[in-house]
Amino acid sequence: MRQTFSRLGLRLAGAAWMVAFPTTVRAQQLTPAVRRAVADTIRQQADRVIAALASRKIERLMELFTTESDLVYVDNGRIYPSREALANAAGGFFKQIGKAGGTWESAHILPLSPSSGAFTGIFRPQMVDTAGKPLWVDGKIWTFVYQRREGKWVIVQAHEVNALPGR
């Protein structure tokens, strides 16, 4: 009886997982063409993060994120549970930027569905503050989860951590 219950429990858990997280199943069913298209789009979106930093305008960065209440941003152990919290935290940093640019290194893109995917990459900055002092010398590792909402690709979840020095 115990084994039967365990097997039934596993089947129910598996069915619940598939209902709750349908993109897991769909990610495996993407055609190569769709997978490439989603990956290319996500890469372009990640490049927009660098362009937003280079603009030194917080508004340009914030337009890349969802306006819906499910946004969560994690920065080196701090959780910003809303768009407003992120904008307030990043706004102070943007005031310090004198010049910004950089490149992605070791980028990994995972298409999850025709309208979602994830990007992880090491951002190697070429940035200085308003006094000319280098910023983020070792870089940042960012993971962005993208979803197309109302026809626009936006970041719905993000995680940022300081990178180790480049090799």
Image (spheres, rainbow, N blue to C red):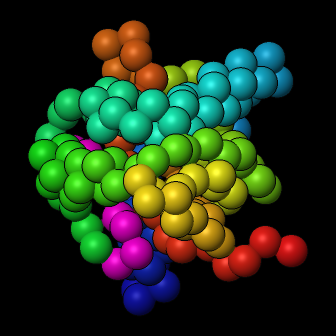
* 155 to the left or right of 144: left
Q: Does 134 appear in magenta?
A: no
Residue at 35% over, 41% down: 156
Q: Residue furthest right?
A: 167
Q: Position of residue 130 (x, y in %)?
A: 41, 53
Q: Residue furthest top?
A: 151
**Please, is residue 19 above or below residue 167 in the view?**
above
- The residue nearer to you, when weighing 89 against 154, is 89
Q: Does 71 appear in magenta?
A: yes
Q: Position of residue 134 (x, y in %)?
A: 57, 64
From this viewpoint, is residue 42 visible? Answer: no
- The residue nearer to you, when weighing 9 against 120, is 120
In which quadrant is the N terminus drawn? bottom left
Residue at 65% over, 71% down: 138
* 118 to the left or right of 91: right
Residue at 16% over, 52% down: 88
Rendering quarter of residue 148: top left
Q: Residue furthest front?
A: 131
**Please, is residue 153 above or below residue 97 in the view?**
above
Q: Which residues are magenta?
A: 70-77
In which quadrant is the C terminus drawn? bottom right
Residue at 37% over, 67% down: 75
